[in-house]
Image: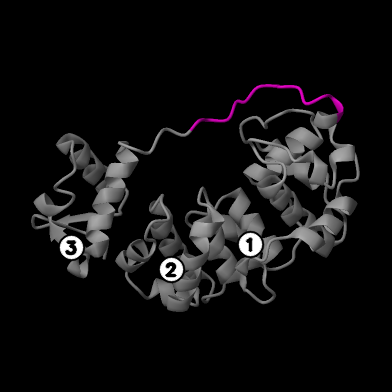
Amino acid sequence: MPDLATPLIAWYRDNARDLPWRAEGFGAWGVLVSEFMLQQTPVTRVIPLLDAWLARWPTPTALADDAPASAVAQWANLGYPRRALWLHRAAVEIRDRHDGVVPRDVEALLALTGIGDYTARAVAVFAYGDRHPVVDTNTRRVIARAVDGRSQPGPPARGDLAAMAGLLPRDDQDAAVVNAAMMELGAIVCTARSARCDVCPISSLCAWRAAGYPDTGDLRRKQAAYEGSDRQARGAVLHALRAAPAHALPADDVAADWPVAAQRDRAIDSLIVDGLVEAVDGCLRLPR
C-alpha cells in the first residue's frame, strides 16, 4: 500500500478551501447540519443557507422546539427536502436522548434519523477529532484510481470503509486531515470528468496513471433528468407551500399551473406519504 498520507497532508494544508465547517470551533451541530445539506448539493448553494439555518437554530434543541414546517420551509432550494424533515427528527432525538448535545459515538450517531455511515463518521472525525475512515463519492474515486487503478469506483460497498481505514495514519489529527484531503482532492483535482494529474500531490503514486489511464468502465447509477420529472413537480408543490401564508393553501391552488395534472397529483401524494405535506380539510400544508 503506497504512503498517500504524507503528500496528502502537506497538499491539504496549502490548498484546502476556506469553508465554514472547517473553521476552528464550528461545533458538532454545525458539522452535522452541513453534512445533511451537502448530500448531493453543491457547496456554493449550501453555504448561505447553512449560515441562515444556524443563525435561526444555533442548537439542536432550538430546531427541535420549532415545527417541522419551519425546517422544510427554511430548506428552500437545497433539493431532496426529506433531508430537512430527517434533520428536524434527528434534532428532536438529540434533545430527548442526548440532552441536546450531538453524540460523539458512531453507533449513537447512526441511531439518529437520516444519518448513515458517512455522516456519522464525518461528525465523529471532523467535529470531535476521533479516528475513523470517512468515505464519500470523492474519496471512493480517489481510492479507485490511486490504489486500484480504475477510472471510476464501483457501487458503494462496505469494503470502502476498510479500504480508507488502510490509508489512515495512526495519529488521530493526521487521520482527520487525510480524510478531509481525500475528499478535497476528489472534489477539485481528481474529479469524475477529469484528472488534473499535473497538480495532484499523489500522481507519482497513482496506479491508474501508472497503468496509462485505462477506461475500466463506469458502473455508477445515472441520475434521471430533473426537467419535467416527478422531482421537479414535487419541488413546485413545496415551493408553493413555502411561500404561502402559514405554509398552507387549498389543495386545488397548489401548483395549479403545473402542465400535467396527473403528475402534480402524484407529486402531492408522494409528499404526503413522505410526511413533507399534510392534507387537512381540503387544504395542503407543511407538517406541523
Q: Nearer the viewer, residue 28 or 3?
A: 3
Please state which of the two labelled residues, at mark 3 or mark 2, is closer to the viewer: 3
Please tell me whether the stretch drawn in magenta is mainly helix, strand or loop: loop
Q: Quadrant of residue 122?
A: bottom right
Q: Is residue 239 left or right of residue 191?
A: left
Is any part of residue 144 visible from this angle?
yes
**Amino acid bearing label 1:** Val
Residue range corresponding to the magenta coloring: 210-222
Rounded to the nearest angstrom, the CA distance separating label 2 from label 1 is: 17 Å
Q: Is residue 11 above or below residue 160?
A: below
Residue 34: x, y in percent? 55, 62
Q: Earlier in the sequence, mark 2 or mark 1?
A: 2
Which residue corresponds to mark 3?
A: 248
Residue 135 in sight in this render: no
Tell which circle, 3 or 2, labels the residue nearer the N-terminal end. Answer: 2
Report the residue at 24% width, 63% height from top. Answer: 243
Query: The N terminus appears in which quarter of the rendering?
Result: top right
Mark toward the viewer: 1 or 3: 3
Mark 2 lies on residue: 92
- How packed is label 3: few (under 14 Cα within 10 Å), some, or many (20 or more)? many
Q: Are marks 2 and 1 in contact (CB under 8 Å)?
A: no
Cβ atoms at labels 1 and 3 below 8 Å apart: no
User: Camera-side residue: 246 or 229?
Assistant: 229
Residue highlighted by disc 1: 123
